[in-house]
Structure formats: structure tokens, C-alpha cells
Image (tube, rainbow, N blue to C red):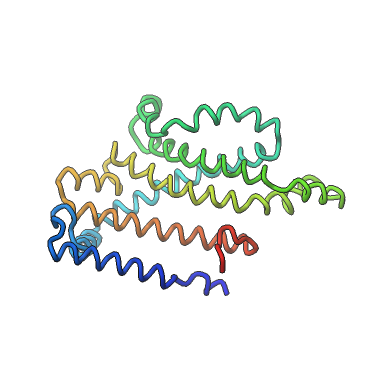
Amino acid sequence: MFRKRLKVSPYSVVTVIGFLLLWQAMVSLKLVNPFFLPSPLSVMKTLIETIGSGELLLHGTVTLGRIFHGFFWGALIGLSLGIPAGWSKRIYEAINPFIAATYPLPKVALLPLIIVYLGIGEMSRLVIIAMAVFYVVLINTIAGVRQVDPILVMAAQDLGAKTMQIFKKVILPGALPMIFAGVRLGMGIAFLSTVVTEMIFGDKGLGYFLGVRGNMMDMTGIFAGLTLLGALSILVTTCLEWVSRKTMPWSRDIQGIR
């Protein structure tokens, strides 16, 4: 049953194939300038060549490592603070002004300040990525814990459940769908933040690769880098969906209608 759920939808396949065929036809019929929009075949050729030479593989590996590193710390801190803040009204009221004041700030805009404090290097990139992930995971975790039906909590208390039992059996299962939604959003933001920071400063990574190719006006190279970035995003998203289904077999919010 689980393997069946992981099968690729035929609608997705048809959509992707149709999009690629339309793209190729537009370039072949010269409806668009191939310099600005290279054909899928030329993009795939460049992608294979750059991966084969090791160039794009190196940049992709570096970017993926930064994504996971920043995501791990951002999600860990967000969960560690979000769960007690969602459970305790006092903790929530204590940190809510801080969240309201700092969440809307573009995290990349803080980069000059972070560079002054930490210098130009991996630590600055890691802090930016982790900060961006932190807020999304934190807010979703708080919302997930706070939306648990209080009637379920009172029912567990009436049955003699202790605090940790209520947390494990009622609060956590009820909050997991929102938590996983925050995790998935956080992973997407980790991709975005990593690429942006690599474009701004760095000597490796897909963001750096895209920036260099852009300066060279190498449109085929840019599309090849974007293709690899999209493939990595699909892979990571699929893994997160697998974890969510494995962890929450009862939830239809994440799995969708069967």
C-alpha cells in the first residue's frame, strides 16, 4: 500500500512531458530566441557534460551540504522552542513580541551585519540559512501545538494521564501535521537561502555556479544549474513526504485524498 502511494502520478508525467515538448517546439520553430531560452536538449547536453566533468557535481554536493546543515540547526532550534511555546501560554506571550518584530525582516538583509560579527565564511551562510528555517518551523510548531483540541487533553486528564503521557499521546500526534508542513516549508526556504547566499559571496555551490554563468551570459549553463537544483529539490521533497507518511499514517492532510 505504501509503495503504491509513492508511485508517480500519470498526470504529473503527462504535464512534464507536455511542457518539455512545448518548450522544444517553441525553440525549434524559432518562436523564441534560443540564446535566451535554450532548448531542453541543449540544456540536458550541458547538464551531462558539466556533471561528467565533475564541475556541477562538486557545486551540487557543496550546496546540498549547506542546505542540510543550516536546515538541521534551524529546525532543531525552532522545534525546541516551538513545542514549549505552543504548550505554555506564558512562554508564548514572552516570545511572541520577539517573533512579531523579527519574523518579517528579510533574513538576507541581515547579511552585512552577520558578516561584521562572523566574517565572510561558512558560519555566516549557516546562520542566515538557519535563521530563515527557524522562523517557519517555529511558527508552524506553535500553531500545531495550540490547535490541538482541548477536549482531547481534558479527556486524557480525566483518564488519569500524566503530563508526559498527554504530550506523547495527544499533543504530539495532533501537532505533527502542522509541524511537518513547517518542516517542508523550511526545507524550501533552506534551498532559497543557500542559493542566494552563495550568489552574494562564495567560491563554490550552485548559487556561485549560477552567478558565474550569468556573468558569462551562458544561458544554457544557467538552465543546467537550475535543472540540477530542481532535481535535488524534488528528491528532498519526496524523502520528506515518505517520512511524513511513515510517521503519520493516519493523516490525510499531508498525504492528500487517496
Expressed as whole percent of the image width and height from the top left, the position of residue 54 reads 24, 58
Q: Quadrant of residue 202?
A: top left
Figure label count: 0
Residue at the (23%, 43%) spot, across then down: 211
Left/right of residue 89 with respect to residue 217 in the rendered view: right
Q: Residue at x 63, y 46 (%)?
A: 144
Q: Residue furthest front?
A: 31
- Quarter of the image that includes the N terminus: bottom right
User: Where's residue 135, x and y in %?
Assistant: 51, 38
- Quarter of the image for residue 126 reads top left
**Residue at 65 percent of width and 33 percent of height:** 92
Q: Quadrant of the C terminus?
A: bottom right
Q: Is residue 26 above or below residue 218?
A: below
- Left or right for 12, reference 133: left
Q: Position of residue 176 (x, y in %)?
A: 62, 52
Please name the residue shown 50% across and 51% down the image: 184
Q: Is residue 230 left or right of residue 178?
A: left
Is residue 94 shown left or right of residue 155?
Answer: left
